[in-house]
Image: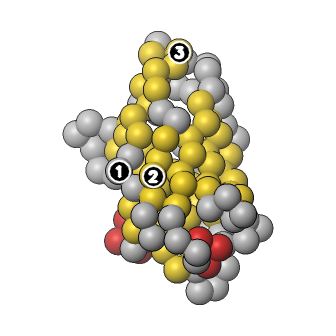
Amino acid sequence: VQLQASGGGLVQAGGSLRLSCAASGRTFSSYAMGWFRQAPGKEREFVTGINWSGTSTYYANSVKGRFAISRDNAKNTVYLQMNSLKPEDTAVYYCAARTDYGGSAYYPFPTEYDYWGHGTLVTVSS
């Protein structure tokens, strides 16, 4: 499957952005999806995940209550709504996919994913 992330940009602190990740292929609904981010000089970190049906989600503590992940399997797309953005949210955001065997949303390590998008840059100014 090929993933294409979009929606990044420059926003002021306290603002919002909505990222999208469009997937090719007919098996999108069988994949668990995740969003990761990587800031300059830092390792890629897990942000949030969602299971194949959208019934289970998981968030890193740093974004809990501010970010929301969702998916539309009919459109082969997963979304990341980001609210109350902070300068520390500045990073390249990546979407990733893996086969969902057990309905879990919690796959926090990059090595657990099979497919990656190219990333979209989010810059939050103070």
Outermost residue toward the right in this view: 55
Q: Which mark is residue 87?
A: none
Outermost residue toward the front in this view: 25
**Residue 85 is at least partly visible in this image:** yes
Outermost residue toward the bottom in this view: 101
Residue shown at 38%/46% (left/top)?
Answer: 119
Label 1 or label 2, whichever comes before in sequence order: 2
Label 2 or label 3, whichever comes before in sequence order: 2
Q: CA distance from mark 1 to mark 3?
A: 24 Å
Counting from the top left corner in percent of width and height, residue 24 is at 51, 65
Q: Which mark is residue 12?
A: 3
Looking at the figure, which quarter contains the N terminus? bottom left
Name the residue beneath numbered marker 1. Answer: 118
- Amino acid on which disc 3 is placed: Gln
Colouring of the image: secondary structure
Vertical placement of residue 46 versus 98, above or below = above
Vertical placement of residue 74 versus 91, above or below = below
Q: Nearer the viewer, mark 2 or mark 3?
A: 2
Q: Which mark is residue 4?
A: 2
- Amino acid on which disc 2 is placed: Gln
Residue shown at 59%/86% (left/top)?
Answer: 101
Mark 1 crowdedness (10 Å alpha carbons): few <14, some 14-19, many ≥20: some
